[in-house]
Amino acid sequence: MVTIDAMCSLESFRKFVILSTCNSFIPESYLEDYEVFPERETSPGPIYVEAADKVTLKKIRDMTFVNAKEVLGIIYSSKSGNTNLKWRQVRRNSGKVTGEASTNTLVNLTEAGVITPEWVQSYLRKKSEEKQQEVKTNELTN
């Protein structure tokens, strides 16, 4: 699991949710409309959009598409339960993503622009340094 704590646009997080859940069957018009978001009520893997104004558009498979204005937050959980992320509005369409993501989810987060390849490299470098420090500590205590 990878701890995510990054700033990103609402549109980037919207793209991530679509890539992760319904990219193969979302109607083209919904894909192009930055106010349309997928939601999923079923467990495992609920997805919820918190907005000042929200209207249900259509249900396709297990996804409900909503038109949301003034989005305050999005809660995303993967069906596997390995990823749990929250996007919270900081200012207008800019926000902060926090939570835990699987390594597979990192690909979609990067592709959608939520995190950058540099962020991933920095994270991996930091984890490698932590592991090396742990090995040195263990060598000293044994």
Image: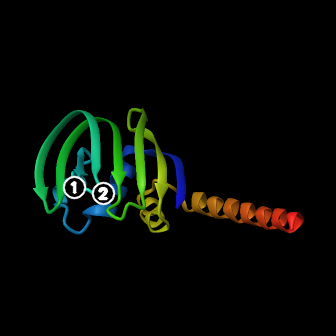
Give the image location of residue 2, x and y in percent. Answer: 54, 59
Residue at left offset 19%, top offset 66%: 25
Residue at the right extreme, as displayed: 140
Quadrant that contains the C terminus: bottom right
- Name the residue that disc number 1 marks: 42
Give the number of marks.
2
Label 1's element? Answer: loop
Q: Residue 73's mark?
A: none
Residue 135 appears left or right of 9: right
Which residue is depicted at the point 11% across and 47% down?
57
Note whether 122 is above or below 51 in the view shown: below
In which quadrant of the rendered view does residue 113 lie?
Answer: bottom left
How crowded pointer 1 is (Cα within 10 Å; few <14, some 14-19, many 20+) is rated as: few
Indicate the quadrant where residue 140 lies. bottom right
The residue closer to the viewer here, 39 or 42, is 42
- Kindly identify the amino acid type of the residue bearing the numbered disc 2: Gly
User: Circle 2 sits on which residue?
Assistant: 45
Residue extending furthest toward the front? 142
Q: Which residue is at 73% across, 65% downward? A: 131
Tag 1: residue type? Thr
Report the Cα–Cα distance between label 2 and label 1: 7 Å
> Image quadrant of residue 29?
bottom left
Residue at 34% in and 44% down: 74
Q: Is residue 37 above or below residue 53?
A: below
Residue 36 or 85: which is nearer the viewer?
85
Q: Position of residue 60 (x, y in %)?
A: 13, 60
Residues tagged 2 and 1 counted as in contact (Cβ below 8 A) = yes
Where residue 133 sits in the image (x, y, percent)?
A: 79, 62
Residue 25 vs residue 102: left or right? Answer: left
